[in-house]
Amino acid sequence: MVSKNKILGQHPLILISVGSTKFSFLRLFSCLKGLNKNKYKITKNFIPTDQFIDSIKKADKIIIHGGPATIFLVVKYSKFMPLIIPRLAKYKEHVDDHQLFFTKYLRSNLPDNLKKYFVINEKINGIIDNYLKEKNRINNLSKYLFLNKNGSKLVRNLEEYINKL
């Protein structure tokens, strides 16, 4: 699928969501410093939920933190595969590693060819570069996460996974 922005000759829209927490996410932002600002239009301001959903629908590339609500919205509304990068307590990006645990759990429910979009590595430079360079891939995550007929089974599996931690 070709994005609307590409058809219109406009810069691709990259949506970056780091959540509303007070903690910094320098690990992510340092990777974006070298981005060619002439090639991409980057949006990173806080926006209300309805505008956020609209931006998700329009975005060519989406890079988000590992917050469960943000992941849910992106899985539900994004046309193209997002890149999910959990905040890590080790780098003081959050109080604990709940985003990493959640990302690992979701990743474990995906086929191997989709796992690369749920990043569990600490080093993310090359991963972000590769994601931005690759051709857009249709988002089919809802087939594996959240919106399936076995929603209650997914919740049960998540509870079991959390209890093992």
Image: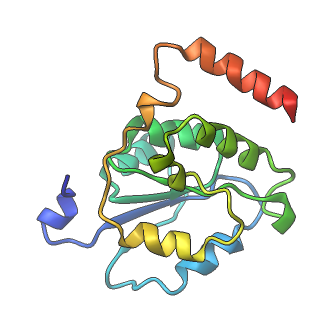
Q: Looking at the image, which is closer to me, 3 or 102?
A: 102
Q: Is residue 60 above or below residue 138?
A: below
Q: How many marks?
A: 0
The residue positioned 34% from the left and 50% from the top of the image is 80
Kindly tell me whether residue 46 is visible in this rendering: yes
Kindly tell me whether residue 42 is visible in this rendering: no
Q: Is residue 37 above or below residue 68?
A: below
Q: Which colour assignment does the render follow?
A: rainbow
The residue positioned 78% from the left and 22% from the top of the image is 160
Residue 97 percent coordinates (x, y):
81, 50
Quarter of the image where one finds residue 158: top right
Task: Name the side, left or right, on which 121 lies relative to 133.
Answer: right
Quarter of the image where one finds residue 104: top right
The residue positioned 62% from the left and 70% from the top of the image is 124
Q: Looking at the image, which is closer to me, 78 or 120?
A: 120
Residue 72 percent coordinates (x, y):
53, 36
Task: Name the side, left or right, on which 139 lies relative to 64.
Answer: left
Residue 73 percent coordinates (x, y):
49, 38
Quarter of the image where the C terminus is located: top right
Q: Looking at the image, which is closer to me, 88 or 59?
A: 88
Residue 137 percent coordinates (x, y):
32, 53
Q: Is residue 60 above or below residue 132?
A: above
- In this view, the residue farthest toward the front is 112
